[in-house]
Image (cartoon, rainbow, N blue to C red):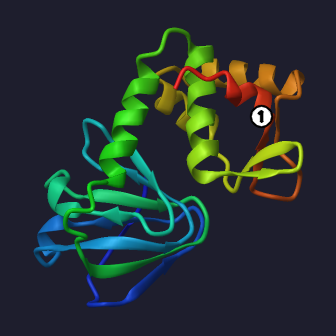
Amino acid sequence: MSFDNYREYPSKTVRIVTGQSVLIDPSSRPKGTCLEVESGIARVYCPCEETEGMTLAFLQSGDQLRTDLLCSEGVCVEALTDLSFHSNVNIAENSGFDAVNEWTLQLLRIRHLGSAEKKLQALFSILVNRLGRRCGQWCELPFRLTHERIGELIGSTRVTSTRLISKLRSTELLITPTGTQTLSVDPSFIEDSSL
């Protein structure tokens, strides 16, 4: 896993392209500030050796990343779509909502559902409902996840996630249109989710 080290530039908008990751070092950040996503979708993950690559959250426009509450080794931000975020934004006091904590809780709940099929269904449900949109007869995600990443998110192996994804494709509940980075999900698949 590779990532660039993010150097702090006061009050700048930082742009990273799809697939690029940056390490955010909390010790170099001014107290009382956070990063705020301006546009795009990001995956926040742990760079620690023991949990390397573990997904903590997905962030979208308007979400804040409070690095003061995360691991002392920092966190990595991966651009799932072209991403821009503001650095050194003041933390929204009394907002009552922390996107990272909310995502971490939801991802933990997914891992504790019964079967791998239910976990996958719940994962796609939350991704579509929070990060996707309805496009005609399909629900669309503006990014794709690898089978290995899906396995990590649902607590299974890559082989299991590949088998489940293949089954969804063969029953036409999931399609990956050629020439785009989008993923389309049949609404009937996610409507019956356990979450």
Q: Nearer the viewer, residue 94 or 22?
A: 94
Q: Nearer the viewer, residue 95 or 163?
A: 95
Classify 143 as above or below 152: below
Residue 101 location (% of width, % of height): 30, 46
Residue at 30% x, 90% y is: 11
Residue 100 appears left or right of 194: left
Q: Nearer the viewer, residue 155 or 37?
A: 37
Classify 68 as above or below 135: below
The answer to whether residue 55 of the structure is visible from this angle is: no
The answer to whether residue 23 of the structure is visible from this angle is: yes
- Outermost residue on the top side: it is 114
Classify 5 as above or below 159: below
Residue 100 location (% of width, % of height): 34, 51
Tell me the kind of residue under disc 1: Pro
Residue at 55% x, 10% y is: 115
Residue 67 appears left or right of 124: left
Residue corresponding to mark 1: 187
Residue at 28% x, 66% y is: 24
Residue 42 appears left or right of 183: left
Residue 14 location (% of width, % of height): 43, 82
Figure quadrant of residue 175: top right
Residue at 34% x, 65% y is: 64
